Image (cartoon, rainbow, N blue to C red):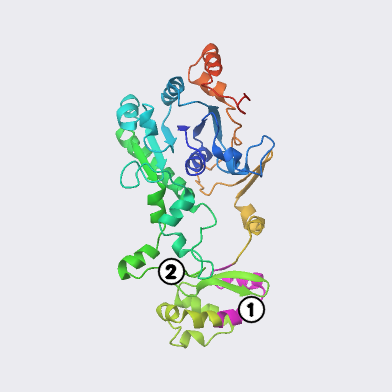
Amino acid sequence: MRVIDLSRVLAGPLCSQMLADQGADVIKVEPPGGDETRTLGPPVNEDGDAAYFMAVNRGKRAIGLDLSRPAGRDVLLTLLEQADILIENFIPGTMAKWGLDYQADLQPRFPQLIHCSISGFGDDGPLGGLPGYDAILQAMCGLMSVNGDPASGPTRIGIPIVDHLTGYTAQSGILLALYHRARTGRGQHVEVTLFDTALSLLVPHAANWMHTQREPGLLGSAHPNIAPYDRYACRDGDIFLGVVNDRQFRRFCDYAGLAALPDDTRFSSNRARLEHRAALRAAIEEALASRPRAAVCDDLMRLGVPAGPVNSVPEAFAQAHTAHRGMQIDRDGYHGIGPAVRLSQAPPRVDRLPPAYAQHTDEVLREAGLGESQIAALKDQGILPRWPPPKP
């Protein structure tokens, strides 16, 4: 599959990187200023590109192209002649302004093309066309209102979770469209918005509210529907205990020296445990306070009771299972997170490191049929910008 990726920052580049990991030929098309994430450092690599950029742009070839100029858009149209998928995250209306609207311009010319557009809110409706960023959507769509505790107040989730899930949602939409095209021969427009994605994350909080009209609140690390399902302190650090049924609760209590709790009417069922959450927490904290967290987690997991240490990022990647699963890639100065999807007949592979700006411009354009004189002329006109931009 040939993917033309016009997107920047996180959701779109993450989507195209996942496709590249599975063997797609992804051509990253950057504007004269480059993808913003190249500059979001330190840390940066030897070429000055930020680690942020490196995290979501492996496996791609890169060209620089000024799409604000007609000659640049002509180059893009030439690239689309050999493309299966186009990904972009421009503010809605930008593609139409350039004469690249899917319905009016691209679909008639490229009927097999799948065009995936990613935006904050879509192109219509009360918020249509407005710019959107992850943290803004976390705030607007209720995610912050259920993250944090009464002391902290509503808190942004520590990773750009909306952008991440939007990238996965976009990939799912593209794969559905590819399946549809295999059956019908026709491409289509795939629309993904951060707004829709952020709202879709509100499980079970939104469902709880819809059924009860009780507004969800701040529970810290606790679960609104399950207890005990929370963070607890051991002697040398915190663990997370996830008990989802009565059988697990009894096993945990037997282990922790709390054998009487399952027969106490306050704790005999999940519903009762939720009603007496504070008393249950106090009993568990007292039982675990003097125990080492590694031993507690290892013992409970082997008893079939889910429990894990609250690790730092370095601790998470130092786990032996991280190495076993191949979830850290260190190669030729590149450091990245490994692919999270494994296909038995088509395993993911990392064939290309993240590209330097416009690294593959000549190679890609020659493949598209442009001659050396045409490429040179486009460079002279600034249609194919170089990096860094020349100083005035």
Can I make out residue 305 in this image? no
Q: Residue furthest top?
A: 373
Q: Who's the residue at 35% across and 64% down the image?
A: 207
Instruction: State the mark number for residue 217.
Output: 2
Q: Amino acid at mark 1?
A: Ala
Q: Quadrant of the C terminus?
A: top right
Q: Amino acid at mark 2?
A: Gly
Q: Who's the residue at 43% across and 37% down the image?
A: 90
Q: Nearer the viewer, residue 251 or 360?
A: 360
Label 1 neighbourhood size at 10 Å, few (<14), some (14-19), many (20+)? Answer: some
Q: Is residue 298 left or right of residue 63?
A: right
Q: Is residue 213 left or right of residue 261?
A: left
Q: Nearer the viewer, residue 349 or 368?
A: 368
Q: Which residue is mark 1?
A: 289
Q: Who's the residue at 61% across and 32% down the image?
A: 356
Where does the image place residue 88, in percent across and percent down from the top left?
Answer: 43, 36
Q: From which residue to which does the magenta span run?
A: 283-308
**Mark 1, secondary structure of its residue:** loop
Q: CA distance from mark 2 to mark 1?
A: 27 Å
Q: Quadrant of the N terminus?
A: top left
